[in-house]
Amino acid sequence: MKSSFGKLKTISEKPWFYPMALFLIAALTYGYTLTALGYYWSDWEVVFFTKLAPTLQPGFYADDRPFPWTYQLIHFLVGSNPIGWQVVTLLLRWAGVLFFVYAMIQVWSQYKKQIYWLGALLIVYPGFVQQAQSAAFSRHIMALCLFALSLYLMALAIKRPASARWLFPLSWIITFLHLFTIEYFSGLELARPVLIWILVTNGSKKDSQLLRKAALYSLPYILITAFFLWARFIYYPSVFQTSSPVGKFAATLGDLQGSFIATVLDFFNRVALDVLYSTVQVWTDAIIGFGGFTFQQRIAWFAFGVGALFALALSFFYNTSEEEASNRPSPVSVILIGLLMFVTSALPIWAIGKEVSTGGWNVRFTLAPMFGACLTVVGLALLLVRPAGQKWIFGFLLMFSVATQVWITNVYRRDWTIQPEYYWQLYWRAPALQADTAVYSFGYPSYMITHDLDATWAINILYHFQVKDGLMPYMFVTPEYEMYFQPNTPIKERVRNVAFIGNTSDVISILHQTDASCLRILDTIYAYDPLLDDGSDKLIPVSDLSRIIPGPSPASPDTDVFGPEPPHTWCYFFQKADLARQTQDWDTVLDLYEQAQQLGFSPGYGAEHIPFIEAYAQTGDWQSAYDLTIAAANLTSRQKRMLCTNWYRFAEFPSADMKWIERIVQELPC
């Protein structure tokens, strides 16, 4: 048996084994529900960008990051399907972590197994939980991959002088690429000369000749970084007429005005909090901070099962207890380099007044500091725990990291069951919209849409937008201010190199779907609906159904983006009936109701009876109108005022049967 285990362990010595093991961890952690993931938050901005006319694309990101080649390349390779973006971004992260692991092995070859564990912790680092936002973070993760590759090529060039003549230039080119892709990893360039010094000395006696050699190797990287800083802070703002990031630095320094000692103490306080957050709190949160966690859900068992499986497998193949050697270097150097990498990577974040530890949307800032954070954790384990116990520490952290990412990925999966339903229902109800239409709502399409602009990009994509004269045709607005309810008030919004110009009189208002109800485009027939609470009733008077073009849309929603059209259940028939009600096509309304009944579909919310109630009233079938009204009142509480208001409206029909109107007024009662 022991010999069999021994033979199995020898597989881990194969050069292909660790990359495949790391890929398996990444693929199962993030990709177990790959086909059910979609677009979230700022992903929609990237999708919007890829659908812009080629002449508009160069100016879209010119304000801050004018080289969006990553988005263009990935879109060229995989198109608009979110699955393709998920795959490419995951491969980039896997490759980046792998390159970093190989670079660190060149620095500390005696700690090879521990560095393999480092890679496993990095691929599922619980401080960064936005991997599923594959489009928005594809640029960031591309830069991560390029930085790590430049580091690895640099280490190889120093270790293999015979190949340095081509390895160094490649490393320089890739360093240039990662800096000009996005600035997130620029701070790490400050740590590069120290890594070069460690690689050059390599345990040798340190002298001035080695110092000159390290300085010579560092010089090209310093020059490339200096050129980037000049371009980013001086050249770009002057050429593109945009604000310089120097202003943010000045504002941050202004906030720190006061005594020198107070400023220094404040800085070290930020550093300490962010270090503790990135090296300790992200794992304690992973262990005890699951929102809504319960083992009654199968996903919880799956998450911890997968985490435990990977932890046990790596403990077997990379057993640190087998490395009780006494000739290894002090792990203090690992800790110090880890802290140095953390601090240098976080300097750009602190310079603009941000902090890693604030969480929320700022968790994106952990991407660069996670290298130093994980290296520090590994170094502390090397210093404080005997090799026999290190695998248990690493395995414990890995299990909870994997479980966290599996759990979070499932949250994204669940959100994508809501978003496409929202967009498809909106399309069924409003096949097309007139240009310059604002869409009002107090509810975003889903939990993973948290800004008006995110929803704006999505709705423009839904309706196959065309930017003309720099104007996009649609804008999503959360009307938080009274001005949005004043008639004939201009709505103007400029975002990057596109703008929206509309009017408060050219609006449709949306009430988000719930578990029991369909999405609704509001008008007066839904007045006094109990779902319209907290001021949402103000959406009704401003909603203009004439902004909807009821005829067939020139093109249905892009299924690559929004997924296949959902099955035609009750909400489909309701939306189409409400559209037919808008055009007073009463026969179509009743035909849709009959189709829904024959298929066994019925509303889950009382107000969804109203289009059919009115159709029966308009066609003189007052008995059916009465019956559906009673059914609506019985289905959902607090509907009576809304139903009564509609019946008072029916009383004004030329063909109104007052006997039925009086009866319903007494029955509800109104």
Image (cartoon, rainbow, N blue to C red):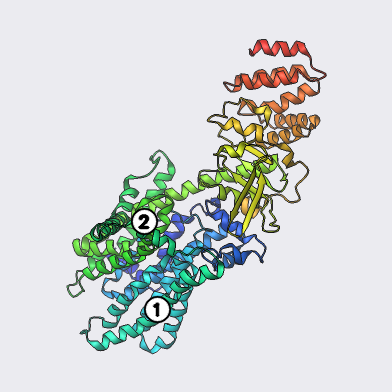
Q: Position of residue 401 (x, y in %)?
A: 36, 54
Q: Is residue 466 left or right of residue 19?
A: right
Q: Is residue 72 above or below residue 131?
A: below
Q: In which quarter of the view is residue 267 placed? A: bottom left
- Quadrant that contains the C terminus: top right
> Residue under circle 2?
356
Q: Is residue 668 left or right of residue 245?
A: right
Q: In which quarter of the view is residue 212 placed? A: bottom left
Q: Is residue 598 above or below residue 68?
A: above
Q: Residue at x 59, y 39 (%)?
A: 483
- Quadrant that contains the N terminus: bottom left
Q: Residue at x 70, y 35 (%)?
A: 573
**Neighbour tally class for label 1: few under 14, some 14-19, many 20 plus, Cα within 10 Å:** many
Q: Nearer the viewer, residue 549 or 427?
A: 549
Can you name the residue that lies furthest to the left here? 326
Q: Secondary structure at mark 2?
A: helix
Q: Position of residue 303 (x, y in %)?
A: 40, 49
**Neighbour tally class for label 2: few under 14, some 14-19, many 20 plus, Cα within 10 Å:** many
Dot 2 or dot 1: first in sequence order is 1
Q: In which quarter of the view is residue 156 placed? A: bottom left
Q: Amino acid at mark 1?
A: Tyr
Q: Residue at x 35, y 55 (%)?
A: 255
Q: Nearer the viewer, residue 98 or 451?
A: 451
Q: Secondary structure at mark 1?
A: helix
Q: Amino acid at mark 2?
A: Val
* Labels 2 & 1 near each other (Cβ < 8 A): no
How far separated are the C-alphas under marks 2 and 1? 26 Å
Q: Position of residue 277 (x, y in %)?
A: 31, 54
